[in-house]
Image: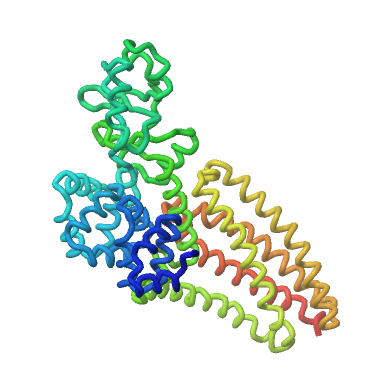
Amino acid sequence: MDLNKETLEELLERGQYRVLHRLLIEIESVEISRLLQEVSHEKAVMAFRLLPKSLAVQVFEHFDTNQQQQFLESFGAEGSRILLEAMPPDDRADLLEEVPAMVAKRLLRVLSPEQRQVTMEFLGYKEGTAGRTMTPYFIDLRHDMTAAQAIQRIRSLALNRETIYDSYVMDNQRQLLGIISLKDLVLADPDVKVSEIMRLDAHSVNTNTDQEEAARILRDNNLQALPVVDVEGRLVGIITWDDVADILEEEATEDMYKLAGIAGERVTGSLVTSLRNRLPWLSINLATTFLAALVINLFESTIAQMVAIAVFLPIVAGQGGIGGTQTLTLVVRSMVLREITWKKGGGQLLLREAFLGVMHGLVMAVIVGGVAFLWKGNYMLGVVLGLAMLGNMIVAGLVGAGIPLLLARLKIDPALASAVIVTTCTDVAGFFLFLGLATVFIRFLG
């Protein structure tokens, strides 16, 4: 029997909980979370209570913050404690920071003293840093241990640790000295000291390091995990590969939202949040469109002499906007991946995009010039339109690459403000080039 929304609701109404339990444990946790989001909250809670503890925790982690809060409010203190303490500390801290303050205080009170302390430490780190992303559950070894003693310690801690493939060697002050793999320990002489076989070139980051930078270091160096140290150099946690996947997805999503001017918004979020996020950028964009309107107003007499010019205005501006957005998206993403910076390849990038602008412009110029000639029967109109298109495509390439580089140089997030600026530049340039050329050659257009 396939489990879908109708089947789940029918089994709950009939009280066939054992059948539903058997069906639920046969599917993936992510599918269960999606299924529970399709039914009413009351029925979702009833089905959720049928899940084994380990599976329930996995399903809970797939919910968004609002759904997690609703479920926690449906359980008593003990049920909330079990779910919260089963979550990774970093995810738990993120949840408590996003829910209302009164709810966060209530949830903190249900945690055990040990888990409450761990959670408070994570809440003390700034969001988006390595300290907020790390896990405190790693294998730590003393430098004076033998290989046999180290293996015994790994065996005793393995069930409650994020990874056992790499262990971290520390001195008596918990200063990170090196790293050693499980393979090296197994192959080593049982009596050899850990300090004699550990690797000294351990990469690490500070708790205040940006999480995106930490993810890049882990990825570029192909590490199993990345140690995180506090300001005094003491090892406090590690960042693992699954954390990196979450970070990169989160950062990519954030950059995409910023380009559209809707950072931090979700389709299930409140209307107030959506209005607060969108209105400022819509207002700024409205203000910039008046610049384009002013350019058109400057050439009002030209348009009055040949109304056909107005027909082609959106084509020049629209193609420039698309070209600029293509370049902008590519450049911002490359900057996020640290493939390009102002000093690292910035000049070459501008030349490359200028050349692409020329090539794209020539192709588009031939096409729109030909269409203008065939449509209006005026070859000079086609020439003017083609030249304006060529010029605007060059502008699109230059501003699409140059604006994000310049903003990054000025310490402004390029993903946040680039789109509005690039669109304004291509609109203004397109209108000015087309109408300016039309004004110069107006006597040949009649």
Q: Nearer the viewer, residue 229 or 358?
A: 229
Up-down: is 219 above or below 68? above
- Horizontal and vertical percent for residue 445? 80, 81
Up-down: is 108 above or below 237? below
- Is 179 left, or right, of 367 in this rendering? left
Is residue 417 something one can see in this rendering? no
Q: Nearer the viewer, residue 269 or 296?
A: 269
- Horizontal and vertical percent for residue 124? 22, 48
- Horizontal and vertical percent for residue 33? 40, 62
Q: Nearer the viewer, residue 47 or 430?
A: 47
Identify the image quadrant of residue 180. Answer: top left
- Is 315 left, or right, of 107 in this rendering? right
Is residue 440 something one can see in this rendering? yes
The way the protein has been coloured in the rendering is rainbow
Residue drawn at x 57%, y 76% is 292
- Is 286 left, or right, of 313 in this rendering? left
Up-down: is 128 above or below 182? below
Residue drawn at x 33%, y 50% is 54
- Horizontal and vertical percent for residue 279? 41, 75
Identify the image quadrant of residue 6. Answer: bottom left
Q: Nearer the viewer, residue 272 or 50?
A: 50
Residue drawn at x 28%, y 61% is 98
Q: How many marks?
A: 0
Residue drawn at x 29%, y 61% is 49
Q: Quadrant of the C terminus?
A: bottom right
